[in-house]
Image (spheres, rainbow, N blue to C red):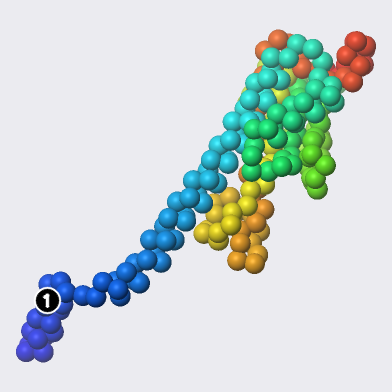
Amino acid sequence: MELKARLRAALYRLWRQEDGTLTIEFLILAPIMFWTFLATLAYFDAYRAEAISEKAAITIADVMSRETNAVSDTYLDGVYGLLKFLTYSDANPEMRVSVLRYHDKDSETNEASDDHFHVVWSETRNGGGSGVQRRLTTSDSKRMTANLPTMGNEDRLILVETWTHYSSAYNLGLRNVWGGNSGDGEIKDIVMQTYVFNAPRFGQTCFSNTPADVDSRNC
């Protein structure tokens, strides 16, 4: 009992003790404060880059949903230029624009079948970089059905996807949030993907490099 009392008294004195050495306490707390400051800057900048990428994709989807003329390669090059202008963190972001057609019936038998989307047209842009994104196929779209809205038979949907690469100079755990590859003590190649869909406001969004030729339009 006496040993416990002495131990309790010693702990109480240690708890109540207020003297110390400022230099030692600063050396203990300074790395934590410095890391917190850098983490605040790094996380804020990463979330800002992600928000800008998301808003850029929403802007592109909205612009295309208002288009009444056929979309061409030149038009998509301009849209891609808009994406590059809006996303500052990547000089060569990747973009895929697709128009999907919803089916709730089999196109041959006209009988009810599993709901799915068919790809009407799909185009990609990667700014001359090492882009790996290919045109969307109907098989791909069928796997996306759970992530797309239910629509009326033969209705169209504009799907805009972007991939923006972001790098942080500090290894602060960003890879655990967004994913990516790490090396040399630095987080590299964090890929921020956006996935935005919108319905055409004025009928169909067609694709054609010869808009004057109505028969060449892919709708």
Q: Quadrant of residue 119?
A: top right
Residue 209: horizontal and vertical position, in percent? Answer: 89, 20
Residue 194: horizontal and vertical position, in percent? Answer: 64, 37
| Residue bearing mark 1 | 12
Q: Residue at x 93, y 11 (%)?
A: 213
Where, quadrant-wise, is the C terminus in this rendering? Answer: top right
* SS class, disc 1: helix
Q: Is residue 142 left or right of residue 176?
A: right
Q: Considering only vertical position in the picture, is 92 above or below 211?
A: below
Q: Quadrant of residue 18?
A: bottom left
Q: Is residue 9 left or right of residue 153?
A: left
Where, quadrant-wise, is the N terminus in this rendering? Answer: bottom left
Looking at the image, can residue 115 be seen?
A: no
Q: Residue at x 47, y 56 (%)?
A: 38
Residue 155: horizontal and vertical position, in percent? Answer: 72, 17
Q: Quadrant of residue 83?
A: top right
User: Quick one: 143 or 161, which is closer to the camera?
Assistant: 161
Residue 20: horizontal and vertical position, in percent? Answer: 21, 75
Indicate the amino acid at tag 1: Tyr
Q: Residue at x 67, y 53 (%)?
A: 189
User: Quick one: 85 or 16, which is closer to the camera?
Assistant: 85
Q: Considering only vertical position in the picture, is 156 above or below 2?
A: above
Q: Considering only vertical position in the picture, is 51 above or below 201?
A: below
Q: Is residue 78 left or right of residue 65?
A: right
